[in-house]
Each structure stands twice: as C-alpha cells, then as structure tokens.
Image (tube, helix red, strand yellow):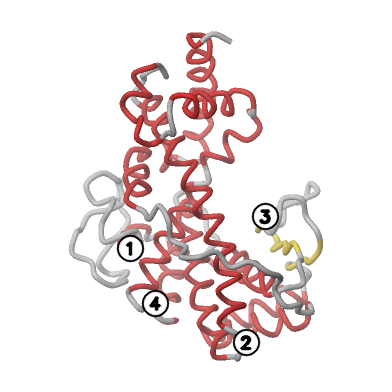
Amino acid sequence: MTISNLYKQATNSLQETFSILQQVDSLFTEEVEVLYKVLEKSPKNVIKGMLQGPLPSLHREEIIILVGDFLDYVNREYATKFYNDLYDNKIVFGKFKEGSFYGTTNGSTEKKVYVDETHTIDDAISLLHEFFHSLNENEYVYRQSFTDSVSITAELLFLEYLKEKGFSEYDIALSSNRRNNIFLSNTDYLRKLLPLYIEISKGNPINANTYKKYSHNYNGKKEFNEILKNEIEESDLRLERALMYRHSIGYIAASTFHQLEQDKIDLIVANETLKSGVIGTFNIILGNGIFESNAPYYTSKELTHFNPKVYQKKQD
C-alpha cells in the first residue's frame, strides 16, 4: 500500500467510526481535544517495580461475602440491592469471552452483571466494579462516559477495606498492578489514537502533517503508520479502541479522588449524583476543572469537593 493510499484509507475509516461515535458517545466527538489533553497530562509510568506471581485462590462464596460486606459498610441500600440481584439471578458467574461486564447477552434486553471468574481476589474487584455500573444506571448518554470513574473509585476504597480485613499488602498490590497495566496500555494507545480523531473532528484528512503535529506521541513514523494500518484493517476494534477513553479517564478521576482522601460518603455522593444526571459534579474528580472551558456541562472552577448543589446540568 502506498503512503497516499494509507492516509486516504485511514481518513475514510476514522471518519466512518467518528460518525458512529457521534451517535453513541457525543462527549467523545465534542470534547476529543480536551480528552486528549487530559491523557497527555496523565502519568506515563505509574508503576514502580513490577510485581508478578499468582494471586491466592478464593471461592465464589468468599467473594460474594467480601463484596456484600463492603457494600454494607458503604451503604446498606447498596448491599440490599446486591443480595436481591443475586437472588434474582441478575449477577452471573462463569467464563465470558468479553471478560467481566454489565450489560445484555444472548438476545436478552435485561442488563445483568457478568463476572468472568478467575477464582481470585480479582473476581471480587470485577464484581464490585460491574455492580456499581448497575447502581448508577440512567438514561443520560453522558453517564456512559463517567460511570467508570465511580466503579474504579469503589475499587480503590475496596482495596483499603481488604487491608483492614487482613489481606496482605503484597496480594493487594499484585492485583492493583495488573489493573494499572490495563490503564497504562489503554492510555498509551489513546495518546496515539486521539490525535487522529482530533484531525477528523476538524474536517482534516490524515496525512504527513498529522504526524508532524503529534510526532512526540509516536516512536517514529513507522509506528504512526502501524497505528493507521491497525485502524484500517481491524475495523471491528475501532469503536472499542476509541471508547477505551472511558476507562482511562475513569482511572485518572478515581486516582484524583483517592489522593484527595475521599471516603465512602463521597463515593455515595458521586454515585448518586451520576445516577441523577447532574454530570457537572464530576468536574472535581476529573482533575479540578479540566472541562470547565469547553464541555457544555461544566460551569465553575471553584469546586474543591463533591457537592451536587454546586453544579447543575445545563438547561437547553
């Protein structure tokens, strides 16, 4: 394939996916440049020394008790819903090629929590993560962009809870590092991918100027071209790759939340605020106002703590 054909096909492929994204995730298409700037500021290396090794085995019953007890500690209503969902078969354990997720399967319209079992502490973290998605379910399209922020925040508080329950710091760090690796891998690719969508959003074709403008993100022009080939040839992954931003932004937001030493009350406020559709409150966990100058749902620079009364959803 010639370079000119590579650029042309990449432009067409990305335009096609961008059109789909306009329908399924308008935050991405409206704020892709802001999202890119956030990821640019995020740590390039958050792991100091890699931990490797097997996690200790845990039975399903132990995992259910751990998560149920943690939810009871956070909010009795959350725990009640958790056990009701278990009873109503809305939480399903097994092996799933998609991994753990909250959604529908096999033609059903009913959303459930699906836990891809490893029979380790990772199952508890996955169960908690996906269950929190069910807790803040609503009809707002922007919720999809921010729900990982709440789920990962719950994960971080859960890891602290596990220490109090006597789990070793080594095992907790091992599980945490595995999840850090997912963040690092996703974010590294997004730093290379989002510049392409920025140009598409501006109506610009992908070409040599694109590389010149964002060359600092790539290990040479060869890698830039490889990214373009990936996006052309792996069409079934294009949408999924773009939507990886949700997890990366969620991870950054949750880490900020954790560094501010927020507690279970803040987690409840964050979850209930997201569920209610007051999206602007998430300005704080996304880094003290990273969206205030651009995003349509952010209006203040002054928030230093979660407070649903401060931000109100913009009225059309």
Q: Closer to the camera: disc 2 or disc 3?
A: 2
Q: Give the residue at x 55% y 69%.
A: 176
Is the residue marked by circle 4 packed among few (<14), some (14-19), or many (20+) residues within 10 Å?
some
Is the residue marked by circle 3 packed among few (<14), some (14-19), or many (20+) residues within 10 Å?
some
Res 167 → quadrant:
bottom right
Residue highlighted by disc 4 = 266
What's the distance in space between the residues labelled 1 and 4, CA to CA?
12 Å
Residue highlighted by disc 1 = 281
Quick check: 312 above or below 192?
A: below
Q: Nearer the viewer, residue 85 or 7?
A: 7
- Secondary structure at numbered mark 4: helix
Residue highlighted by disc 2 = 69
Disc with the residue nearer the chain's start (1 vs 3):
3
What's the distance in space between the residues labelled 4 and 2, CA to CA?
18 Å
Disc with the residue nearer the chain's start (1 vs 2):
2
Q: Is residue 63 left or right of residue 139?
A: right
Residue 293: where, in percent of width, then height? 22, 47
Q: Is residue 155 left or right of residue 52?
A: left
Quick check: 62 above or below 134?
A: below
Under mark 1, the amino acid is Thr
Q: Give the residue at x 65% y 58%.
A: 102
Residue 21: where, in percent of width, then height? 50, 35
